[in-house]
Image (cartoon, rainbow, N blue to C red):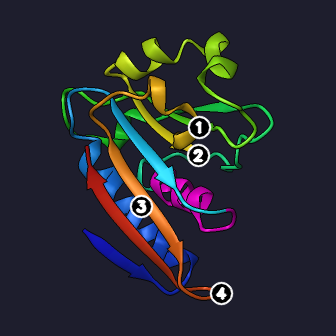
């Protein structure tokens, strides 16, 4: 599926729509966010988090590598729903070994987590086979092409 966004609000809307779909999944969800520097990956995460009812200010965890946000129980009217949004930024890592201390395998396998990973290609060896891939391309200064796919 491909979307075109003319501004940050439209990018966040696409992300929010996806968030409201994946919140219903009964297994963990890993979303790989691809795109060059400044494409809008963190903007996407902001819209995703906002749709889940997360009120914290979302910043890229470039220097801390990972941030965890609690998903409010009021977000889902379902008996089951994830409790944490995990935001990982791999821009500064060389490969998956740089993330060994984070124990990503258990994070990926927990049905309580929704995980969004920026720069996933740097840790592709440890990513689950089943994930949602988002690729964001610059079209112009403000316009973006957002491609969503599953693997």
Which numbered disc, 4 or 2, marks the residue closer to the eye?
Answer: 2
Q: Are marks 3 and 2 in contact (CB under 8 Å)?
A: no
| Quarter of the rendering occupied by the C terminus | top left
Mark 1–mark 3 CB contact (< 8 Å): no
Identify which residue is drawn at 64% across, 17% down: 97
* Residue at the spot of label 4: 141
Residue contact at pointers 2 and 1, CB within 8 angstroms: yes
Q: Nearer the viewer, mark 4 or mark 1?
A: 1
Read off the residue under disc 2: 119
For marks 3 and 2, give the CA distance.
17 Å
Compare marks 1 and 3 and give the one earlier in the sequence. 3
- Find residue 71 and name its label: none
Q: How far is the residue under mark 4 from the one under mark 2?
A: 21 Å
Identified at 44% across, 45% down, the residue is 32
Which residues are drawn in magenta?
37-50
Q: What distance separates the C-alpha of mark 4 from that of mark 3?
A: 19 Å
Circle 3 residue: 15
Which of the labelled discs sits on residue 122, or is there none?
1
**Mark 2 or mark 1, whichever is nearer to me:** 1
């Amino acid at each position: 599926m491909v979307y075109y966004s003319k501004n940050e609000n439209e990018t966040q809307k696409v992300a929010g729509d996806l968030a409201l779909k994946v919140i219903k999944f009964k297994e963990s969800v890993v979303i790989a966010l691809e795109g060059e520097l400044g494409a809008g990956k963190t903007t996407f995460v902001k819209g995703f988090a906002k749709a889940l009812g997360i009120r914290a200010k979302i910043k890229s965890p470039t220097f801390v590598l990972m941030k965890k946000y609690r998903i409010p129980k009021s977000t889902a009217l379902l008996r089951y729903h994830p409790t944490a949004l995990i935001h990982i930024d791999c821009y500064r890592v060389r490969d998956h070994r740089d993330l060994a201390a984070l124990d990503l395998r258990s994070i990926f396998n927990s049905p309580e987590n929704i995980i969004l990973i920026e720069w996933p290609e740097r840790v592709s060896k440890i990513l689950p086979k089943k994930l949602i891939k988002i690729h964001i391309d610059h079209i112009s200064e403000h316009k973006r092409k957002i491609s969503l796919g599953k693997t």
